[in-house]
Image (tube, grey):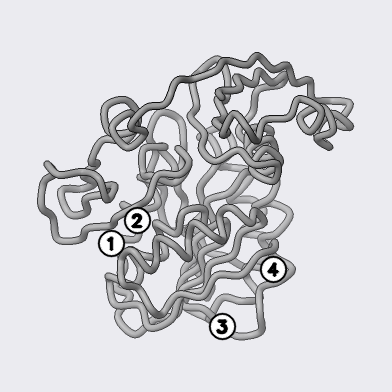
């Protein structure tokens, strides 16, 4: 069963909220189009009553409408490979692929992701920007915090680049499960995943913190990231547009961070700061 979800306003954070809620009632995979979010669920598990009870309907500033379509049985790996998830090469150094890909280029780093959802496969501009920044980091023996870890793609790459210990945090249980699965798929044993927001960051200091989330969350939680960042450590943030960069830089400066650089792709930005 495919459920097409139209949101107003149609923002990244609203889609993330809806994905989390749909995942809690049995939806197993998602794809995004410019017009809507598409969720897939086993037909026997579909319940319109469960949909109508989602808490997103309690948000007065968000409007959601649904349409449904029964999808015949298919080879879903083949569907993903042909339509949604192609092997992706970033900076000619890192290839992102699914387990079912048989024809893919070789690269210095290879991350295998089970694409249960479209998010976190590297195809979104913010994910590829974050990957590019991580590729430039010397992580040998370093500690890394991955906020909003999603599929675990950034954590896995950090491990492959020599990080000693990585902690991934995400508010969505699907993301936690997905990160654990993908870590095992890539034979990564030094990655711990916990569920929650910035409030669950444990005591201790990290050499690198990656936060690919959303503008307002970054602004709200940045002070908690800094508490967990070593002097001389770096904070990489993405999930916002070029027009938001000055606001992000302003908040970072208030908290004692020094701006180093930024990169952009189709108006999306990844910005790097350090704590001196």
- In whole angstroms, how far apart are the C-alphas of marks 1 and 2? 5 Å
Q: Which of 194 and 269 is in front in this view?
A: 194
> Which quarter of the rendered picture does the N terminus lie within?
top right
Residue 103 sits in which quadrant? Answer: top left
Circles 1 and 2 in contact, beta carbons < 8 Å: yes
Q: Residue 205 carries which label?
A: 3
* Mark 3 touches mark 4? (CB < 8 Å): no
Residue name at image x 40 percent, y 60 percent? 182
Number of marks in the image? 4
Sequence-first tag of 4 and 2: 2
For marks 3 and 4, the one nearer the N-term is 3
Q: Depth check: 130 or 62 in front?
A: 62
Q: Mark 1 points at which residue?
A: 136
Mark 1 → mark 3, Cα distance in angstroms:
21 Å
Please tell me which of labels 3 and 2 falls first in the chain. Answer: 2
Q: In which quarter of the image is residue 245?
A: top right
Q: Mark 3: give few (<14), some (14-19) or many (20+) Cα within 10 Å.
A: some
- Residue 11 position in % (x across, y down): 64, 28
* Label disc, if present, on residue 53 of the rendered structure: none
Residue 50: x and y, percent?
79, 33
Asked whether the beta carbons under mark 1 and mark 3 sit within 8 Å of each other, the answer is: no
Query: In 3D space, how far apart are the residues under numbered discs 3 and 4 (Cα atoms)?
Result: 11 Å
Q: Which of 190 and 49 is in front in this view?
A: 49
**Mark 1 neighbour class, 10 Å CA radius: few under 14, some 14 to 19, many 20 or more:** few
Name which of mark 1 and mark 3 comes first in the sequence: 1
Gap in angstroms between the C-alphas marked 3 and 2: 20 Å
Q: Mark 4 points at which residue?
A: 224
Q: Where is residue 9 in the image (x, y as percent from the top left)?
A: 71, 21
């Amino acid at each position: 069963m495919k459920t097409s979800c139209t949101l107003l306003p149609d923002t990244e954070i609203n889609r993330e909220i809806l994905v989390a809620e749909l995942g809690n009632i049995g939806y197993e995979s998602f794809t995004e189009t410019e017009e809507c979010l598409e969720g897939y669920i086993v037909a026997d598990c579909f319940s319109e009553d469960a949909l109508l009870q989602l808490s997103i309907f309690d948000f007065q500033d968000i409007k959601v409408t649904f349409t449904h379509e029964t999808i015949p049985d298919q080879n879903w790996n083949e569907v993903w490979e042909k339509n949604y998830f192609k092997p992706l090469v970033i900076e000619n150094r890192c290839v992102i692929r699914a387990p079912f890909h048989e024809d893919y280029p070789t690269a210095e780093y290879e991350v295998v992701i089970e694409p249960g959802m479209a998010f976190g496969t590297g195809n979104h501009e913010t994910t590829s920007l974050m990957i590019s920044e991580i590729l430039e980091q010397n992580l040998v023996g370093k500690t890394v915090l991955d906020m909003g870890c999603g599929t675990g793609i950034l954590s896995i790459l950090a491990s492959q680049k020599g990080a000693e210990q990585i902690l991934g945090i995400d508010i969505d249980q699907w993301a936690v499960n997905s990160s654990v699965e993908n870590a095992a798929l890539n034979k990564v044993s030094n990655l711990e995943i916990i569920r929650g927001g910035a409030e669950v960051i444990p005591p201790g200091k990290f050499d690198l913190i990656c936060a690919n989330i959303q503008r307002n969350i970054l602004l709200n939680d940045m002070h908690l990231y800094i508490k967990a960042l070593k002097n001389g450590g770096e904070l990489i943030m993405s999930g916002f547009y070029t027009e938001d960069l000055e606001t992000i830089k302003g908040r970072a400066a208030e908290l004692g961070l020094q701006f180093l650089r930024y990169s952009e792709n189709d108006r999306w930005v990844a910005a790097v700061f350090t704590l001196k």
